[in-house]
Image (tube, rainbow, N blue to C red):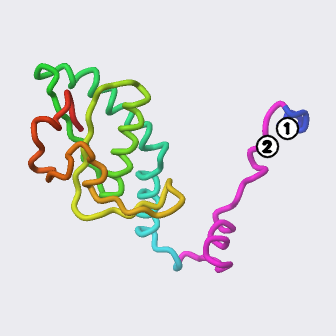
């Protein structure tokens, strides 16, 4: 392997490797950690939250969900079938909504989307600057109407 790396046939994957301990120190102003600094359950919860919100992870799931809907659900009820995607948090709902819309547009599908949650969500990633997103701004086709009472004109062929 060393020879293949030296001859340029493969890349050295360890060249930019950062151990967890160093990454922790960089993120926490040089403080070191030990077993008592990070509680296991809190760490697992934080890591799983990061995994659930990672754009790649969401994009992969969105592809499966949209393709299943397009193939098996949309043909039902004379093209007026609807589906609901339930996620664990408001920020996750915003990320899924945006990812679904991006995928639908890339595939050229005519599927409408809608998101529902209370209050506002402050997003940070993947956007570089935080932005506040109330549900109303994510559903422009409602034209200011409450999500509970959309008119028939806002219903599309199929809706998320």
- Residue 83's disc is none
Question: Where does the image place residue 15, in percent across and percent down from the top left?
Answer: 79, 50
Q: Secondary structure at mark 2?
A: loop
Disc 1 versus disc 2: distance between alpha carbons? 6 Å
Q: Are marks 1 and 2 in contact (CB under 8 Å)?
A: yes
Indicate left or right for 1 with 67 as reference: right
Write down the region rendered in magenta: 9-35
Label 2: few (<14), some (14–19) or many (≥20) C-alpha neighbours in 10 Å? some
- Tell me the residue that label 1 is attached to: 5
Residue ranking furthest to the front: 143
Residue at 49% x, 43% y is 56
- Tell me the residue that label 2 is attached to: 12
Query: Is residue 113 placed above or below 110 in the rendered structure?
Result: below
User: Which residue is at the front of the view, 50 or 36?
Assistant: 50
Quarter of the image for residue 1 reads top right
Let me know if residue 13 is in the magenta part. yes
Quarter of the image where the C terminus is located: top left
Residue at 10% x, 41% y is 151
Let me know if residue 67 is in the magenta part. no
Question: Where does the image place residue 74, in percent across and percent down from the top left?
Answer: 21, 24
User: Which residue is at the front of the view, 98 or 146?
Assistant: 146
Residue at 43% x, 52% y is 53
Question: Where does the image place residue 49, in percent across and percent down from the top left?
Answer: 41, 58
Residue at 37% x, 37% y is 62
Quarter of the image for residue 75 reads top left
């Amino acid at each position: 392997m060393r020879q293949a790396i030296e001859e340029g046939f493969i890349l050295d994957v360890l060249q930019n490797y950062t151990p967890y301990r160093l990454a922790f120190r960089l993120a926490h102003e040089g403080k070191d950690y030990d077993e008592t600094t990070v509680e296991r359950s809190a760490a697992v919860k934080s890591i799983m939250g990061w995994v659930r919100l990672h754009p790649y992870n969401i994009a992969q799931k969105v592809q499966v969900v949209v393709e299943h809907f397009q193939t098996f659900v949309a043909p039902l009820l004379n093209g007026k079938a609807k589906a609901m995607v339930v996620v664990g948090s408001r920020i996750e709902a915003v990320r899924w909504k945006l990812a679904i819309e991006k995928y639908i547009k890339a595939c050229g599908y005519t599927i409408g989307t809608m998101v529902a949650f209370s209050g506002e969500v402050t997003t940070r990633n993947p956007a570089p600057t935080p932005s506040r997103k109330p549900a109303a701004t994510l559903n422009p086709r409602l034209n200011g109407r409450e999500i509970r009472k959309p008119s028939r004109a806002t219903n599309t062929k199929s809706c998320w």
